[in-house]
Image (cartoon, rainbow, N blue to C red):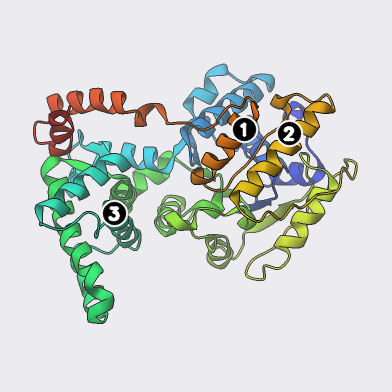
Amino acid sequence: MHSSILSDLNPEQKAAVTYDKGPLLVLAGAGSGKTKVLTHRVAYFISEGLTKAENCLLMTFTNKAAGEMKERMSSLIIKAGLPADAAARLQAGTFHSFCAKILRIDGKVIGIPPGFLIYDEQDQKSLVKEIIENQNLSTDEYNPAAVLSVISDAKNQMLSPTQYSEFVNGLSAQAGEFQQVVFKVYLEYEKRLKEIGALDFDDLLIKAVLLLKGNSEILEKWQDKFTHIFVDEWQDTNKIQYRLIKLLVGNRKNLTVVGDISQSIYGWRGADYRNVNYLIRDYKDIKTINLEQNYRSTQNILEAANSVISKNTSHPILKLWTKKHKGERIKLYTARNGLDEADFIVNEASRLKRRHYKYSDIAVLYRTNAQSRVLEEALLHAGIPYTLVGGTKFYDRKEIKDVISYLRLLVNPKDSVSRKRIEKL
């Protein structure tokens, strides 16, 4: 046993890292070291010879998280005295990137060319907007983002345009009017994607599931390649992602998932926190380990959080605790409106500055980007410097998307979305 991998773990973390008797569900509260457990578990399995690095598949929700985990595992593997290239042989990435890999290799079996384009959210909106306008409909009345959201929901339920039409026909005339338009757009949208040779993000998941489900030899190939599967942020998976994992796991049941239902915040994009419950239902022999010791917050904050989440009755609840001090009591200010709220924040920031804190010691969190305008105006008026975190992403910048559109059109002259973008320049 390589003690370096286990040396800095608490008893619950150690139990989660070393369990090797079948599927494992780690319910990990915020700040309890879930990423640490996941990376140490992968490194432990490799160091103990329970699996090879190239047979491990680690699924995350962002490329950044995947990169950070690979770095951590690389460090652990080297400390354990194993070859440095072991971490490089690990497959760590997002669900979408993994499905894209499957489809580029084996997608031709279901008619998907290896060089297919991947349409991001902005590409999808542009195509839907073009279709709505071509059908002489108002984009004010039929907002492209709203139409695309319904199409995405239908895809996540694995409803084809025809199946979606059958659902719409069961609605009342008034309730189904918008959905009838969505059906027509959905039908044309799928037709156009096929002509262009493109898949959207939903297609990557759906097509991969259909490919694996309908072709046993291909499924067995991928099952043999990845004998041990590890999934981060399980509470944020949707139905299709769960189906994908079940297909890949097969009868081996070498599955580890980490999550916390109380941290599920992506229901609006199809995430189903009930996948935790479904996992317990579908894998009768699954072992559940709770991580409840928090390393991030004070006890007062944890007690407030525990009080809020304890009202939930639909899923297992973790009771977080810490060895840290109680900390300052939580203060609540109920503002009359947004202006009052902004004034309070400015006054509080000024008070803390007078107490010799720096403005850079202060963080303000808000729920929606729209709320930042009033706050920014108040800070500017008071002469308080600030940095807005989370600006426009690099690949979402207009100039970057313009360049990419030129490159896409060079590769695929049928890409009408890219052509239309260039024509507007």
The residue under label 3 is 148
SS type, badge 2 = helix
Q: Are marks 2 and 3 in contact (CB under 8 Å)?
A: no
Identity of the amino acid at label 2?
A: Ala
Task: Tell which tag, 1 or 3, sits nearer the viewer.
Answer: 1
Above or below — where is 180 with respect to 29?
below
Q: Is residue 193 visible?
A: yes
Say which mark, if any, is on residue 409: none
Name which of mark 2 and mark 3 comes first in the sequence. Answer: 3
Above or below — where is 356 with respect to 264?
above
Mark 1, Cα crowd under 10 Å, few <14 / some 14-19 / many 20+, is some
| Quarter of the image that includes the N terminus | top right
Which of these two is toward me, 351 or 171? 351
SS type, badge 3 = helix
Q: Are marks 1 and 2 in contact (CB under 8 Å)?
A: yes
Task: Tell me the CA gap for discs 2 and 3.
Answer: 41 Å
Name which of mark 1 and mark 2 comes first in the sequence. Answer: 2
Task: Tell me the CA gap for discs 1 and 2.
Answer: 10 Å
Q: Is residue 49 visible?
A: no
Which of these two is toward me, 411 or 257? 411
Q: Are marks 1 and 3 in contact (CB under 8 Å)?
A: no
Identity of the amino acid at label 3?
A: Leu
The residue under label 2 is 349
Image-based side of 20 in relation to 68, left or right: right
SS type, badge 1 = helix
Task: Tell me the CA gap for discs 1 and 3.
Answer: 37 Å
The residue under label 1 is 379
Name which of mark 1 and mark 3 comes first in the sequence. Answer: 3
Above or below — where is 339 with respect to 8?
below
Identity of the amino acid at label 1?
A: Leu
Task: Tell which tag, 2 or 3, sits nearer the viewer.
Answer: 2
Q: Position of residue 186 (x, y in %)?
A: 20, 58
